[in-house]
Image (tube, rainbow, N blue to C red):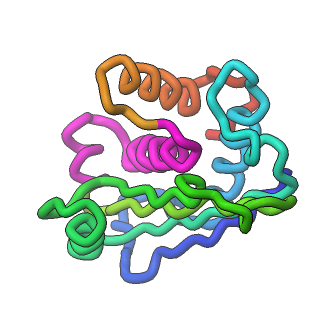
Amino acid sequence: MELDLALDREGVTLQASDRSDLLDETVWLQQLDHWLSCLCGDSSLDCPSLVRSAQELSLGLRFTDDASIAELNSAWRQKTGPTDVLSFAALDDPGDWMEGPSIELGDIVVSLETARRQAQEQGHSLERELRWLVSHGLLHLLGWDHPDDNSLAAMLALQERLLGDGWSGQPG
């Protein structure tokens, strides 16, 4: 399986204390490719059959600021103010156009400002917070949701597995 990643980081800047590769397309391509391989390769996990059988997966990843994500949050979720991550899943209504070797997963949008605040509040690195948020967004693109406590617990446990050493050979 090949992953096509469109990374947008226009208008956001890292601070001097941040790792220089936090918004690097190659780093995120490798990370997402690894996560998708793990998720698609584990038959015990819910993963759309279209995704498991695809030769190529495509997704967008956008890092933005609080003002921009607040606009999206208002327009798409009718909620006021910024949020940490939004997912726009193309698989919610796949239709005939999704049949074939290349599958569009959708887009993940992350507020770098909110991620930075949350990392400080949680006492961990911005890198970990970004990986947490992007993994959460990816699971939403694959159809995972958390309408109740049990599904939230399952989703959070899977995120920890993705970020931890739940699969051997995981980068970073």
Q: Residue at x 16, y 60 (%)?
A: 79
157 inside magenta stretch:
no
The chief SS type of the magenta part is: helix
- Give the camera-side residue of 62 and 78: 78
Q: Residue 107's x, y, as percent?
A: 52, 63
* Image quadrant assignment for residue 11: bottom left
Magenta residues span: 115-144
In the displayed orientation, state which residue is furthest to the front.
96
Quadrant in which the C terminus is drawn? top right
Q: Residue 144's x, y, as percent?
A: 50, 37
Query: Looking at the picture, does residue 115 appear above or below residue 6?
Result: above
121 inside magenta stretch:
yes
Instruction: Tally the marks.
Output: 0
Q: Residue 91's x, y, as percent?
A: 59, 54
Q: Residue at x 86, y 59 (%)?
A: 101
Q: Is residue 81 left or right of residue 94?
A: left
Q: Residue 143's x, y, as percent?
A: 53, 42
Q: Residue at x 32, y 32 (%)?
A: 147
Q: Residue at x 36, y 54 (%)?
A: 85
- Give the camera-side residue of 156 and 87: 87
- Give the camera-side residue of 61 and 102: 102
Q: Is residue 164 left or right of residue 11?
A: right
Query: Looking at the picture, does residue 116 appear above or below residue 16?
Result: above
